[in-house]
Amino acid sequence: MILDIDLVSDFVCPWCFLGKVRLDRALADLKISRPELEVRVNWLPFFLNPDTPAEGEPYRAFLEAKFGGPIKAEAVLDKVREAASDDGLLYAFERIQTRPNTLDAHRLMYRAQAQGQKPERIRALAHALFAAHFQEGRDLGDRDTLADIAASACGDRREAVREWLDGRGSIDAVERMAAGVRKQGIEGVPFFILNRKMAVSGAQSAAVLGAAILQSLETGKPS
């Protein structure tokens, strides 16, 4: 049996990082009871702030402008830290200097999926992109950084990835997909579409995601 999951996210969304970690846990638990299940996770692009400049923008200034000052911005970050603590996920917001434009990061993920790379490499790439931003403070808008990530996470040739990023490969496809997601009414991420049958919005717990996945597997079965 095949489980298809479309995961709509942005790599600068802290809740998406948490959602990814919780999905991994839900799938690991599911593998114990359903070892025959083949899981396919398809990452779909979303731009939290489509008007982010190509060169990015100062991270802390962006947060303070969005949430109404440094105290309120820090309170938002504390809420994320607290929510993720039980999952063992640590954020290093203090390391982040730049809020990047994530077009190239989404292109990198699109490229890996279009090449048919193995699911474990796709998972590794997604985790590496999130970790680079939220734990290491690296700039996901920097193409050298992205090429390094692709080489370490997927075993790609760094120079080939860097050259590809300098071209226009997958730009139109990623932008069309992101626009298509918006047209479907998806305005917040993470957003999980399970077997084209059910949708789960937000960084729900592993237990909630697991229950929804099981329900999607049962939905439509003959009684």
Image (spheres, grey):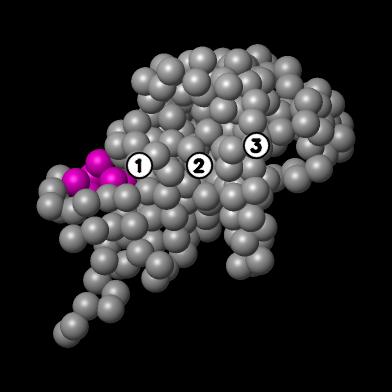
Q: Which of marks 1 and 3 is nearer the N terminus?
A: 1
The residue at the point 30 percent across, 67 percent down is: 215
Magenta stretch, main secondary structure class: helix
The N terminus: image quadrant: bottom left
Tally of numbered discs: 3
Which residue lies under the disc numbered 1? 116
At which x and y percent is residue 203?
50, 47
**Disc number for residue 168:** 3
Q: What residue type is labelled 1?
A: Gly
117 with respect to 64 (left or right): left
Residue linked to disc 2: 110
Instruction: State the SS at label 3.
Output: loop
In the image, 152 versus 204, the foreground residue is 152
Where is residue 158? Give x, y as percent: 48, 16
Q: Position of residue 125 (x, y in %)?
A: 43, 30
Per the model, the C-alpha gap separating discs 1 and 2 is: 10 Å
Q: For the residue marked with disc 2, what is the amino acid? A: Tyr
Q: Quick check: can you spot residue 84?
A: yes
| Circles 1, 3 touching at the beta carbon (< 8 Å) | no
Mark 2 and 3 residues: CB-CB less than 8 Å, in contact? Answer: no
Q: Position of residue 220 (x, y in %)?
A: 28, 78
Q: How far apart are marks 2 and 3 (CA)?
A: 13 Å
